[in-house]
Amino acid sequence: MRGTMMDFPLTLPHLLDRAGFLFARAEMISRCPRGTVTRTTYADFHRRARRLASALIRLGLRPGDRVSTMMWTHATHMHCFFGIPCGGGIINPLNLRLHPQELAAIVKHAGSRFLIVDDALLPVYESLRAAGASFEKVIANRYAGGDVPPEYLDFDELIANEGDDFVYPKLDENDGASMFFTSGTTGASKAVVYSHRSLVLHGLTLTMADCFALSHNDVILPVVPLFHANGWGFSHAAAITGAKFVFLGPNLDPETILDAIVEHGVTFAAGVPTIWLNVLCALEKYPERWKFPPLRALCGGTAPPLGLIRGLDKRGIHIMHAWGMTETSPLATAPLVKSHMQEYGEDALYEVRAKQGLGVPLVELRVMRPENPADEDCANTVEAPRDGKTSGELEIRGPWIAGSYYNAPDQAHRWTADGWFRTGDVATMDEEGYIKIVDRAKDLVKSGGEWISSVDLENTLMGHPAVKEAAVIGVPHPKWQERPLAAVVLKDGAAATSEELRSYLAKTFAKWQLPDAFVFMSEIPRTSVGKFKKTALREQFANWRWD
Amino acid sequence: MRGTMMDFPLTLPHLLDRAGFLFARAEMISRCPRGTVTRTTYADFHRRARRLASALIRLGLRPGDRVSTMMWTHATHMHCFFGIPCGGGIINPLNLRLHPQELAAIVKHAGSRFLIVDDALLPVYESLRAAGASFEKVIANRYAGGDVPPEYLDFDELIANEGDDFVYPKLDENDGASMFFTSGTTGASKAVVYSHRSLVLHGLTLTMADCFALSHNDVILPVVPLFHANGWGFSHAAAITGAKFVFLGPNLDPETILDAIVEHGVTFAAGVPTIWLNVLCALEKYPERWKFPPLRALCGGTAPPLGLIRGLDKRGIHIMHAWGMTETSPLATAPLVKSHMQEYGEDALYEVRAKQGLGVPLVELRVMRPENPADEDCANTVEAPRDGKTSGELEIRGPWIAGSYYNAPDQAHRWTADGWFRTGDVATMDEEGYIKIVDRAKDLVKSGGEWISSVDLENTLMGHPAVKEAAVIGVPHPKWQERPLAAVVLKDGAAATSEELRSYLAKTFAKWQLPDAFVFMSEIPRTSVGKFKKTALREQFANWRWD
């Protein structure tokens, strides 16, 4: 027997209309390239997103057509996040930091017909075009200010010509709404298409008290760019809460972030560990410069070292450590500390907070390992014991988890026969359900039949007072298959020797787990989203000669 | 183009399994009839709900079959809230306070095959049977203790015989999960069937920061019974959060409630205004007896008088005023105070809090009135201006709003041609989106072509220091069609005259709005869920002779 409830689809126009009316006066603050600040409201958001939808349809947008954006993080980009899908299209935000060749391949795979681009990024667009990408229409947004060259459509003019009587096309909740590409460090980029349903459900989860409790009365600073991994869902959480948002645009240095926190009264921010490491350095360097009430800071992308969590705690920034990836929308775990843990001592509580947390509602997680670990080719997997020690590949399912990549049948092996997504992350789960990511499967160091976690070594190294950054990779070894090598960046003015770092690690690690080499560098190569680019390190040290 | 997300249905087994694992140790505390307290865990909840599902299928339960419950509010009833739908059945909790004839009609309309009944309620079951209701199987739950008579199945024995290897049947998210009847004060009771999807979405909403922010670290006391209006969604919020729950069973006097708040450290409670009025009276009578940290108290069913909100504020109980009905699952509005209102003065803030609040995410509201108000038969309606003054019927839609009643084609007029549910409540909406319920359509006093809100008069009267309760009804009048009559219950030891109350009201109301008669009574008749039973009052005063 079916329920007698209404058939009410979960789609973005509902969120847009609700926000436009209930939160009409709430503000979005956008920092522009020249340092000026523009203030727009949710009423503007509603009006401009609807007009954009209307204009795109007038330009020929058909249901399901892709529209790429090449924009920094600011209010107009938010308008695109709703205007394009509310017009029946699919927004495809481009990661500006990729190589033009890779971007051109992405645009081609997406099959985008239109592009909306910040004026400040027209040179990037030109290099993209030189790399072979083409669009039927290119719409330029006056972000840096000044005039739009005549060969482009002018975003503001375009929507100025629209009325406010737009009627949304009929949308199914499973229709695509946005297309994001994974920042594949190896191989071709792969795309997922988020549906209206998945975005609504994912956005609601961000507002749950036991996830991030995003509220209308928060002032939210998403340091993470909108074009990275669904912008971590903040555009949708914005529409749901009507919270005041602060968008910083391209300039994400720690001083700018801390200035914004003070100036706008930020209560919640979100970014990768590198961002927070830099913020902590700035706070340590100028302890008197910034004064602000305590705030929550979502940290994802990679695990924050424990020293970072502790250091920021002392300065009123409470790190909330979560895990996810583009394929998971991305929110999959949240850092809930259970009621019976409230009486834990400080160290035990930090141990809980350093883990990736618990699966959020509607998300299911399991850790799977070969049925016969001795047999390297064993294809059958079984669930690992939930003991916090036994590691295996993390698998996941839920309503906002990718069920396939877009047009990539050769990637079917990423899903199990019973429908779970293989994350490629190696993790443990403890008896309480907390997930701890041990490593990316491909970053584990395979030494003499044993696995060594590069992440554990890195995080411990980064707790050494002289170490700013550390990345550990497996380097081919004639006897052990691979042995760990640590690339280390020291803090300004600090000094350390290999022997010193080795004995520091030896307090926590077994002898066979210790890196056999320490290489001191001025910086570690990074991916476009700020993660260590281990492929580059592996290449650099591929011919390392072990003594 | 469809999204590439997984097809993951929103169903209750997911919530049950997640809670049973992640919150295994969390407690549910149930007060038993003799005053003893039993403590069970979420691990018990998981095991017993699954075993119940298994046992019911073994007894012959088929997909969609209805299973009625006749139980107080305690952990085992929670187990039924999940065990029955997770076995593919539909739970139909019976409102014990209804007349046996009405209950028998409900059971017949529901077509229930099985009944699960508290031992303490077997006499009620007997009267139900005498009224003509019959079930294939009757399962008795040892709640009061003692043995189960041999003619009934024993709940505990039944599930003791089941293993823990139950495999859920395949469920569609739109399958029915529970069936509730409206407590119709007029006409036959009508039923809605909540789907798995609607219950999951509704339950998630309760946990949103801007709704009630229910969290794992709350201690929740749902004074509202589980059998009333979907138990206000608390069973599902329990499974989502794994919060500690306190269930009081039948005894809901204010001393018991306040004792429980102190003893168990309650941080969130929920009940109708009558409950909170009694709690306030008890706190005023014994100001030193109960000491507790501040808590949130959801108040719904009917509007709490402003004096109640203010009075409880002084004693650390923060009333959160919301609106809903059985047909709306019930949560439809939540009492968010917007950021720009934080600087309002005290009186203006109370005015906001006395309203029913804003539509929650995924719920849409509109106030509709006749296109031509002068024409009584005008069938065309238009949206009323959002001015906080113009009233009309409140209409609603959303994924947890009834799209029809179960097997009641004669009720199709309750839905508009464009698919909104007509609530029967008369309301205003202001420019900020706040809803204010003016009255039930049928309770408005129609006097000389003007409408008078009985609710406004009642709430103001209940602000008079001598008045404990007041109910206003329209009584037929030869000249004015109807005129208001106020039934008043005075506080113990207090005194007041009609003239005094009339001049008290005259400070706020126009002369034509004032009741023409005040009748002092020892109590006001109530419905089974504690609302004023105005039908009984109207009957009593149908032949009132106006001077």
Image (tube, coloured by chain):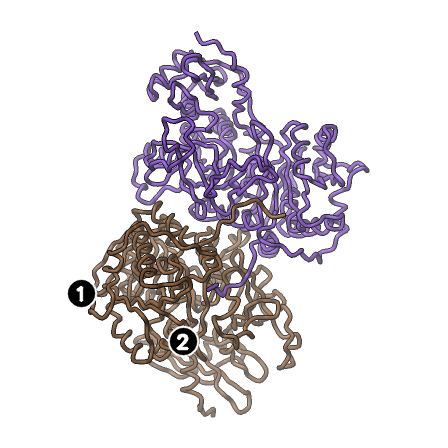
Chain colours: A brown, B purple
Q: Position of residue B371 (x, y in %)?
A: 37, 33
Mark 2 highlights which residue? A532
Going by the numbered disc 2, the residue's amino acid type is: Phe
Whether residue B36 is visible to the viewer of this picture, yes or no, is yes
Residue B326 in which image quadrant: top right
* Mark 2 vs mark 1, CA separation in Å: 37 Å
Compare residues A466 and B533 and report the one nearer the observer.
B533
* Residue that protrudes farthest toward the left in the picture: A146
The correct choice, above or below, for B514 with respect to B178 in the image is above
Q: Position of residue B398 (x, y in %)?
A: 48, 46
| Number of callouts | 2
Q: Badge 1: few (under 14), some or many (20 or more) residues near its Cα, within 10 Å?
A: few
Q: Which of the numbered marks, if any, corresponds to residue A146?
A: 1
- Horizontally, residue A464 falls left or right of residue A374, namely left
Q: Position of residue B66 (x, y in %)?
A: 67, 43
Residue A485 in which image quadrant: bottom left
Q: Badge 2: few (under 14), some or many (20 or more) residues near its Cα, within 10 Å?
A: some
Whether residue B262 is visible to the viewer of this picture, yes or no, is no
